[in-house]
Amino acid sequence: MNDNNERSGIVTILGEVNVGKSSLLNVLVKKDISIITHKSNTTNKQIKGIRTHKKSQITFIDTPGLYFSKGKTNRNFLTDIWNAVAEADFLCVVLDISKNVSQNLFQFFEQIDLKNLPYKKSILVLNKIDLVEKEKLLIRAKEINDKLQFDKTFMISAKKKYGVDDLFLWLSKNITKKKWLYPSDKNSDQSFEDQINEKTREIILLRIHDEIPYNIEVNSDKILNFGRSKIRIFQSIFVENQRHRSILIGKKGETIKYISMNARKKIEMYMKKKVDLFLNVKIKKKQNKK
């Protein structure tokens, strides 16, 4: 039965690589939805986290980190970003306030034209404020708002969970009366398989760092349930070439054993049941060009 007092809104989270967007999403949703590593652009596709609180439901879209290269920018990457912007009621721009803001970022948001986006509000979120002196923080906040003129500014530390509740409560009060998009118990648009695949991919990227590209793929080939307390998962990890496969397996299989053990623990924490995890490292098949 639908409640006439339901409120709903979509918030797209934008920002450069490694500013803490995924950390912010996870704290906002109170669930590990988006993976977090020190590797640039770990989030390689849109990920939606959902949080329902009382009569309000907010869908947060975590986007790939903005990057600016002299070469040709990937068209699919830009399409994902623009689609996420078009879908949103609110644009949440996250900056690492402990670093200088790049001119490329200013130019990007000038192209979006934050001031004239119809029916959208733009929010500035200054992250990692625990790393900056208060006086310097206020000066930077004013400089950024003078250039881009956001509707609202929040100062937070996603890592320490400071200021995030204020952001969520403000969003809850400012979304409009609208039917919820998801059931109240849903916290992500990802399938169960996607979520456990991401748990394994996170452990891989934390272990391997820069030796293997972030676009490594993990697929669940088979999932077997043994009652309510145990599950057996068979996953394939797809890499680009034999060198990457050797790195992932490691000397005497030590690396893949480490990945399997820690991914199993992470999936067990997520599922709250015992997990048997079996990993197989494969080389992606190259498509023949016609």
Image: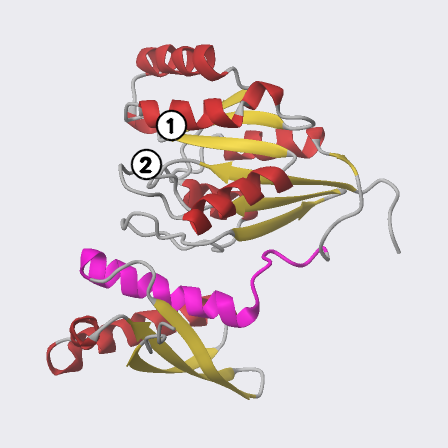
Disc 2 residue type (three-letter)? Phe
Residue at horizontal 35 percent and vertical 72 percent from the top: 289
Assess whether residue 191 is covered by the magenta stretch.
yes
Q: Residues within 10 Å of mark 1 (few under 14, many from 20)?
A: some
As drawn, the label of residue 105 is 1
Q: Position of residue 223 (x, y in %)?
A: 50, 84
Residue at horizontal 42 percent and vertical 35 percent from the top: 15
Quadrant showing the C terminus? bottom left
Pointers 2 and 1 in contact (C-beta within 8 Å): yes
Q: Quadrant of residue 171?
A: top right
Residue 59 is left or right of residue 81, and the answer is right
**Badge 2 is on which residue?**
68
Q: Position of residue 77 (x, y in %)?
A: 43, 48
Mark 1: which secondary structure? helix
Q: Quadrant of residue 56?
A: top right
In the figure, 114 relative to 146: above or below?
Answer: below
Q: Which residues are magenta?
A: 184-211
